[in-house]
Amino acid sequence: MQDRDPPFPRCRLRQVVLTLPEQPRIPFYNHPNQDKLYSKFMGLAHTCLEELICKMFGTPGYKVEMIVFLHAHGRRGSYNLHLHVIFAEGAFDSENTE
């Protein structure tokens, strides 16, 4: 079997943790459709981080792919909704298809 180079050589990953502030935790916890609410929370995190990264690079055409994990409880078992977001140090330029 032939060794292959990784698809993105020397691509480092970053993790960001986004925690829901204490004030909206009770409404989130008591929401009748938590799946939809949590999904929107993860989508909002992606949109905000992608916008931030595009502004940092100065290019609005970048697309950033992320993996988002939802954690609903902290270390002590209390309800502490937060997201772990993993993404690469870099982005795909949707304007440059070469």
Image (tube, rainbow, N blue to C red):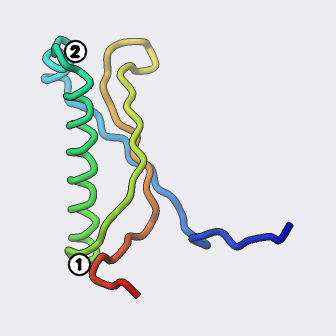
Q: Amino acid at mark 1?
A: Thr
89 is higher (above) or lower (below) than 41: below
Q: Residue furthest front?
A: 1
Q: Residue at x 19, y 28 (%)?
A: 37
| Percent coordinates x, y for residue 64 in the rendering | 34, 63
Along the line of sight, the residue nearer the viewer: 35 or 15: 35
Lower position in the chain sequence, tag 2 or tag 1? 2
Q: Name the residue rendered at 23%, 75% in the picture.
A: 61
Residue 38: image location, x then y, percent: 25, 30
Local crowd at mark 2 within 10 Å, few (<14), some, or many (≥20)? some
Work out which quarter of the rendered image holds the N terminus and state it.
bottom right
Mark 1 residue element: loop
Residue 70 image point, x, y percent: 37, 32
Specify the label residue 59 is tagged with: 1
Q: Is residue 48 left or right of residue 82?
A: left
Residue picked out by circle 2? 29
Q: Is residue 21 positioned above or below 29 on the image?
A: below
Residue visible at 28% across and 65% down?
A: 53
In this rendering, position of residue 1 left or right of residue 44: right
Residue at image position (13%, 23%) is 23
The answer to which quarter of the image holds residue 22 is top left
- Element type where label 2 sits in the image: helix
Which quadrant is the C terminus positioned in? bottom left
What label sits on residue 25 in the rendered view? none
| Residue type (three-letter) at the residue carrying disc 2 | Tyr
Between 8 and 81, the one lying in front of the other is: 8
